[in-house]
Amino acid sequence: MDQSYKFWDRIAERYAKQPINDEDSYQKKLAITQQYLAPSMNVLEFGCGTGSTALLHAPHVKHYLGIDISPKMIEISQSKLSQSNLNNIDFEVTTLDNLNAAKETYDAILGLSILHLLEDRNKAIEKVYELLKPGGVFVSNTACLGDSMGYFRYIAPIGKFFGLIPLVKVFTRSQLETSLETVGFSIERRWVPESSKLVYFIVARKPMD
Ligand SMILES: C[S@@+](CC[C@H](N)C(=O)[O-])C[C@H]1O[C@@H](n2cnc3c(N)ncnc32)[C@H](O)[C@@H]1O
């Protein structure tokens, strides 16, 4: 069993109170994402955290499922949902690996600030590809530390050992693109925010059959 939920459970309340650190970039990512959403769509977000982004996108789609490994994060998401008037969102404690969903279920899948936190991003990307309908899109926002902070790969295990940071994988933007293209995605949008060069925002599409 993946124990990383313990780290996220521990920081969930604090995470929920943190202000967005770059509001302009966040708004731009929301706007780009919504260009790819439509009222008929079935959407999955994995690693949804406290559900804030889910609540903003859900009014634009038919159904939105937010999943997260941390029960505490999902508890906070549920509490925010109960204060909204939305009835097309579900939140669930689970991972991509354990998600009970048939192949080609989703029109769009979002993975925001998550791929660099997974033991095996390639396995996650394969699963996303499998879960998407032909023509579906994968929207991701990933810290690509390998381009300018490659040394972090030596620090990360120490920080993780002391419980200061979660598991963090170090890879470059180009390695992330290769992971996506290897399974068959074609990359439609790439954006590195001016204010944070570590972040790589990508929209990738699964081809039509
Ligand atoms: C940095 S936070 C990002 C949260 C949210 N997506 C955002 O952009 O604010 C990472 C989230 O991924 C979740 N997480 C970590 N590993 C996961 C896994 N294997 N499966 C699902 N969620 C995971 C954590 O519990 C946490 O809520």
Image (cartoon, helix red, strand yellow):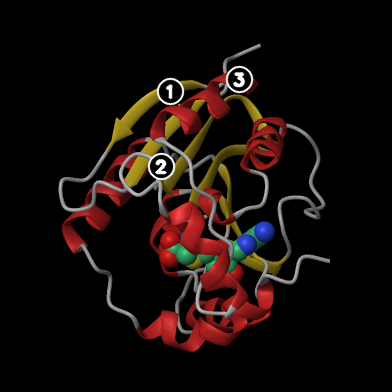
- Mark closer to the observer (3, 1): 3
Q: In the image, what residue type sits under mark 2?
A: Gly
Question: How much space separates mark 2 and mark 1, taking CA atoms?
Answer: 20 Å
Pick the residue in front: 35 or 75.
Answer: 75
Question: How much space separates mark 2 and mark 3, taking CA atoms?
Answer: 19 Å
Sequence-wise, the earlier of marks 2 and 1 is 2
**Residue that mark 1 sits on:** 187
Local SS, label 1: strand
Q: Quadrant of ligand 1?
A: bottom right
CB of mark 1 near ligand 1 (< 8 Å):
no
Sequence-wise, the earlier of marks 3 and 1 is 3
Q: In the image, what residue type sits under mark 3?
A: Thr
Sequence-wise, the earlier of marks 2 and 3 is 2
Question: How much space separates mark 3 and mark 1, taking CA atoms?
Answer: 11 Å
Pick the residue in front: 131 or 126.
Answer: 126
Q: Position of residue 76 (x, y in %)?
A: 54, 82
- Residue drawn where x is 65% and y is 38% of the image: 128
- Residue drawn where x is 84% and y is 66% of the image: 1
Would residue 5 be found to the left or right of residue 10 on screen?
right
Q: Position of residue 98 (x, y in %)?
A: 81, 55
- Residue drawn where x is 28% and y is 77% of the image: 19
Tag shown at residue 182:
3
